[in-house]
Image (cartoon, grey):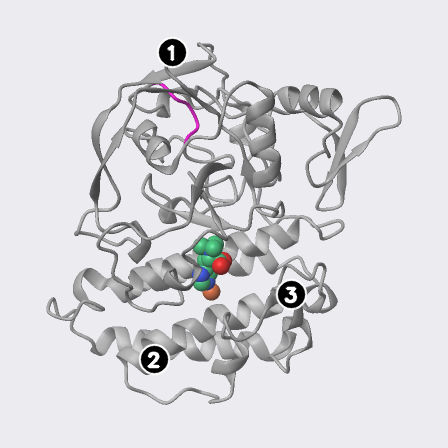
Amino acid sequence: MAGRLDEARRHTLKLVEPLTHEQLNRVYDPILSPLIWDLGHIANFEELWLVQRIGGREPLRGDLGELYDAIEQPRKIRGELPILRADEVRPYMDGVRERTLEVLREIELDPEDPLLADGFVYEMLLAHEYQHNETMLQLLQMVESYEPVEVDGAPAAEQVSDGPEMVRVEGGAHEIGAGPKGFAYDNERPRHRVDVATFLIDRTPVTNEAYISFIEETGAEPPMYWERDGEGGWVRTAMGRTEEVDPRLPVIHVSWEEADAFARWAGKRLPTEPEWEVAAAGANRDRANLDELSFGCAPAGAYADGCTSCGAVQMLGDVWEWTSSDFTAYPGFAAFPYPEYSEVFFGDTYKVLRGGAWATRRDVIRTSFRNWDLPIRRQIFSGIRCAGDDV
Ligand code: AVJ
Ligand code: FE
């Protein structure tokens, strides 16, 4: 566990290593926290759950809990809070980590305590840091001339497979959600039965090429970060680099509204959450564009050897896929370990995304994992895979 905690932290620090203090502190967009807030929040979450709750110790600085409370402090004001700044945040992160390792050495993983059984609280801590890495990457898209410390170029070179536009998924009684064993978030539980009618699902994510046809024909807005190149084509600027839009790549940074409009334009619809998870059965996350270091998508149709039982490709990795479903509780849901992770977001305000993106760490994604956001949001690494009825 100490090794995994260390790996997670090295990865976080690697992402921010090229940045100046000014870039760390800067508010690039009111819908995203400054990176310096994410760093302090990652450490504060660790202090709260491991050092204080499990280790029974006092916090290093009692006033920090409130500043790093994601519910108390909306993103748009995080830049103005008296949070730890560039030279204070690293000593805090290191100080908390030292005490976390102390607690880890002391503690017995009591199987009777749901927080400790199978190391739940440690898995939650890792998943939390991984998820904040992805939020940080959303902001890094906006940082001019960001030069990553390490880039994995392999996904771009993956071979593209051929196959039908859509594949068929047999209906009937299926089970979705996470079983009782192992780490999963409360919103993935309990595993339960769903009845789905036979349906069709796109074999690959929707490409930039298809999305260009949609915007040219309907006048819809281009995805976030796109601009006209002046000659009728499109360019995309991320991390300060402007490149021609590659027609073969999955479209990314589109809102739910746009995804839904695209699907209807294509004579299709978005999949429901149960449909998505049934179609994803058998996906191999080790053969997927995940783990953040590709800094972009693999071409649609790549990783065919990681395909699902129904033959769908890239259901894990590359782009989060919008579903038609609202983020709601599964039947028998119980908030654990705190209602602010999932429960406070249940309702008809948020839409569910599935499958993870290139910017998602591999160890946090699984076919039952549920992500959610507002239907107008595009700063997330969101794309589209359409479904259809079997006629
Ligand atoms: C699951 C991505 C919606 O960023 O609000 C991070 C993850 N929860 N810290 C978010 C999360 C607490 C969450 N999302
Ligand atoms: Fe958080």
Quick check: 3 above or below 66? above
- Label 1 C-beta lies within 8 Å of the nearest ligand 1 atom: no
Some atom of ligand 2 lies within 8 Å of the CB belonging to the residue at label 2:
no
Name the quarter where the C terminus is drawn. Answer: top left
Query: Label 2 to label 3, Cα distance in Å?
Result: 25 Å
**Residue 282 counted in the magenta span:** no
Residue 356 image-quadrant placement: top left
Q: Residue at x 37, y 44 (%)?
A: 365
Residue 150, given in percent of the width and then of the height, sits at 57, 46
Magenta residues (range): 311-315
Callout 1: SS: loop
For residue 34, which numbered disc appears in the image? 3
Mark 2 touches mark 3? (CB < 8 Å): no
Query: Can I make out residue 222 in this image?
Result: yes
Mark-to-mark CA distance, 1 and 3: 49 Å
Q: Is residue 114 left or right of residue 209?
A: left
- What's the amino acid at mark 3? Pro
Q: Nearer the viewer, mark 2 or mark 3?
A: 3
Q: Residue at x 34, y 80 (%)?
A: 51
Label 3: few (<14), some (14–19) or many (≥20) C-alpha neighbours in 10 Å: many
Q: Position of residue 273 (x, y in %)?
A: 37, 37
Quarter of image, res 174? top left
User: Pointer 1: what residue?
Assistant: 391
Give the image location of residue 93, x and y in percent.
49, 74
